Image: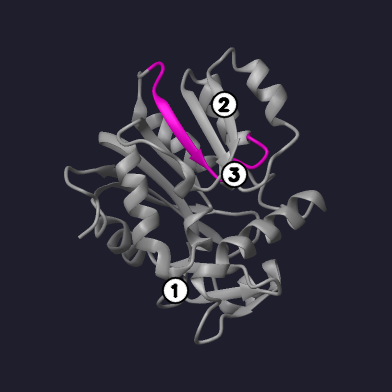
């Protein structure tokens, strides 16, 4: 994804040398996503390319009926629906509640639940067979990557799967951008994504380039398996 392409698609500019302070960034994320969902500007929701991450996760899970999947940033619940329709149990979390959650919960026959919370709000360890992050990591504050990935590792059962989708950088090292509300957007090369995730207790399983609806734009979808240990080096 080139500088002008990401800027044209999301109205972003290169982030300042010092991005927003991490202590205030959680509210930046919540408020900006609230604005996008309420005003129907969540253009990513309808992208078919966004469904590749849950499809890859399901292929890797194979025949495991009842596998418990955590869906981070579940949004309107489209990925959660794919997962529970395939037989998984799903916990969907987001910073913003969606009106679709009630109907999805009823339709899931008890196999899905949704909660307004951040990843750090969740309790427990080794409670999920898989974690899906379909477009959340690339909006995290860089100072929080270690805690974010470390918490995912803690929540996974030994050998659990982590599937993540991020913006792909096509021209050199990935850059950090920010929109007018100061929400961050991070591009990754395949090497950068794998280096970051494997540094926090995971081994790579599969990484794929997923074309989007706009020429030249792609997601990187990576699948990683949790190794033993505390998840942070």
Q: For mark 1, what is the residue?
A: 174
Q: Is residue 68 magenta?
A: yes
Q: Which residue is mark 2?
A: 113
Circle 1 sits in a helix, a strand or a loop, which is it?
loop
Q: CA distance from mark 2 to mark 3?
A: 12 Å
Location of residue 28 with respect to 57 vertically, above or below: below
Residue toward you, 28 or 37: 28
Residue span colored magenta: 65-77
Instruction: From the viewer's perspective, tell me whether residue 71 is left or right of residue 154.
Output: right
| Mark sitting earlier along the chain (3/1) | 3
Is residue 87 positioned above or below 4 on the image?
above
User: Of the residues tagged 2 and 1, which is closer to the observer?
Assistant: 2
The residue positioned farthest toward the right in the image shown? 39
Mark 2 and 1 residues: CB-CB less than 8 Å, in contact? no
The percent position of residue 181, horizontal first and vertical second, equals 69, 71
Label 2: few (<14), some (14–19) or many (≥20) C-alpha neighbours in 10 Å = some
Estimate the x, y position of residue 136 in percent, counting from the top left: 52, 54
* Secondary structure of the residue carrying numbered label 2: strand
Q: Residue at x 41, y 26 (%)?
A: 68
Image quadrant occupied by the N terminus: bottom right
Query: Residue at point 60% right, 17% down?
Result: 108
Say whether residue 179 is visible. yes
Q: Residue at x 40, y 77 (%)?
A: 173
The residue labelled by disc 3 is 94
Residue 6 location (% of width, % of height): 62, 71
128 relative position to 225: left or right: right
């Amino acid at each position: 994804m080139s500088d002008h392409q990401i800027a044209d698609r999301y109205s972003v500019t290169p982030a300042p040398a010092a991005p927003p302070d991490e202590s205030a960034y959680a509210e930046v994320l919540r408020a900006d996503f609230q604005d996008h969902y309420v005003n129907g500007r969540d253009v990513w929701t309808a992208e078919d390319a966004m469904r590749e991450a849950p499809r890859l996760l399901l292929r890797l899970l194979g025949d495991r009926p009842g596998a418990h999947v955590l869906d981070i940033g579940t949004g309107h619940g489209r990925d959660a629906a794919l997962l529970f329709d395939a037989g998984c149990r799903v916990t969907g979390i987001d910073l913003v509640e969606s009106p679709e959650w009630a109907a999805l919960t009823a339709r899931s026959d008890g196999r899905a639940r949704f909660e307004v919370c951040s990843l750090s709000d969740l309790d427990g360890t080794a409670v999920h067979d898989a974690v899906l992050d379909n477009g959340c990591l690339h909006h995290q504050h860089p100072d929080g990557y270690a805690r974010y990935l470390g918490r995912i590792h803690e929540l996974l059962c030994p050998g659990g799967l982590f599937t993540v989708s991020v913006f792909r950088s096509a021209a050199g090292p990935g850059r950090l951008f920010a929109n007018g509300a100061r929400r961050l957007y991070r591009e990754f090369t395949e090497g950068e994504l794998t280096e970051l995730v494997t540094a926090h207790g995971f081994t790579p399983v599969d990484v794929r380039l997923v074309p989007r609806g706009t020429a030249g734009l792609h997601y990187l979808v990576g699948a990683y398996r949790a190794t033993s240990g505390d998840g942070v080096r």
